[in-house]
Amino acid sequence: MKTFNRLIFICCIVIISACTAPIAGNSPTLSQTPDYAIVKVMYATDRNYNEATVPNNVYGSKRATLSYGISEVSIPRHHIIGVLEEPSLFKLEFKESPEKHVALLGVKPLAKEDFFTQLSSDVSHTEQSKAFLFVHGYNVSFADAARRTAQIYYDLKIDMVPVFYSWPSQSKTVSYTVDEQNIEWTQNNLKSFLIDFLEKSSAQNIYLIAHSMGNRALTRAVIDVINTKPDYRARIKEVILAAPDIDADVFKRDIAPALTASGGPVTLYASSVDKALIASQKIHQYPRAGDARNGLIYYPGIESIDATNVDTSFVGHSYPAEERSVLSDIFYLINADLRAKERFGLSYVETGKYWKFKP
């Protein structure tokens, strides 16, 4: 039976791989050159704007008012699912090349009205009026947020519009406490953007994805929006919390009840080998919601999934975007709106009331 299950799972991965093969088409989000694809990713940010000619330097790490725009990211022809290809010293690569790397090719700021006009137009070209919003975590630059969003979109290859929100992370490992202050500061800006996103985008099926520290702002913003505009929750089809760097007790007491009060689904991915969250616990002295070592979060309305079995990276923190099995799970969650019990590759742990990836 295990052999059969593995065979079926491999077939699922093959299907995902086929779905993520380069495609030419009429999508306003994806275009092709002979050697690489170009993914158009829309963004909102409260980082400071710089008059820079190099796309990676257009937005900095200081706080600013909300601004909007479109970024273009290359995906090389030989892109590997889950990988953010970048220059390697071992290959004597000293600068980004769109033929080889996932690279930020350009950034075009837009006025707010023009941004939402463009967003609505792009959403209208999707069959099911779908869009997703990604909120990155700690130690991430604007350029890396754009690259990651484009990679997630390209690897999932679901007919939807990719958007990301970039807050002023310092993009430095040593600046964890500064990032903590900035993610708290950005919460109201994210809430304002989320309300505009719901009011002005025309998207009827919206998927919200946050990673690591980004979960702190997204969960609070969603709760505020639901409390302010309860009718909007029906259009938020899923809130996906990936490796959330949130105090586990605060999450269970304050966030989970408010997030699930309206009945909308929430999915939480956690791991017991996430070194970033293990370090976070040492700093804060309390477990994190995305750290499965002390047991996964159980709360009615939240489907918690243990990703420990699939995480093979050294740090073990970026599995939601890097591991094929997790990307496959997210694919079926978004593309077919399947709940955990309906998605192949997951098994239920009765004692803890959570799901885990099958070995």
Image (spheres, grey):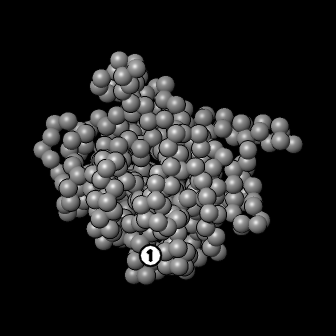
Quadrant of the frame with the N terminus: top right
Name the residue at 49% across, 74% down: 250
Question: Which of the 4 image quarters holds residue 9?
Answer: top right
Answer left or right for 185 relative to 238.
Answer: left
Q: Amino acid type of disc 1? A: Ile
Q: Nearer the viewer, residue 11 or 48?
A: 48
The residue under the point 73% across, 57% down is: 342
Q: Quadrant of the C terminus?
A: top right
For label 1, count other residues whose C-alpha is less than 10 Å away and answer few (under 14), some (14-19) or many (20+): many
Mark 1 sits on what residue? 223
Q: Is residue 208 visible?
A: no
Of residue 217 and residue 67, the one placed in the foreground of this image is 217
Q: Residue at x 76, y 66 (%)?
A: 351
Instruction: Identify the residue at the far left of this view.
Output: 51
Labels in figure, total: 1
User: Which residue is drawn at the image coordinates 28% and 62% (left, top)?
Assistant: 182
Work out which residue is located at the far top of the displayed protein and give it.
Answer: 92
What is the quadrant of residue 305 in the picture? bottom right
Relative depth, front residue between 247 and 302: 247
Q: Most extreme residue toward the right, as rendered?
A: 1
Q: Position of residue 28 (x, y in %)?
A: 39, 43
Q: Is residue 212 visible?
A: yes
Q: Position of residue 353 (x, y in %)?
A: 71, 67
Residue 218 image position (x, y, % from top left): 41, 65
Circle 1 SS class = helix
Quadrant in the picture for residue 46:
bottom left
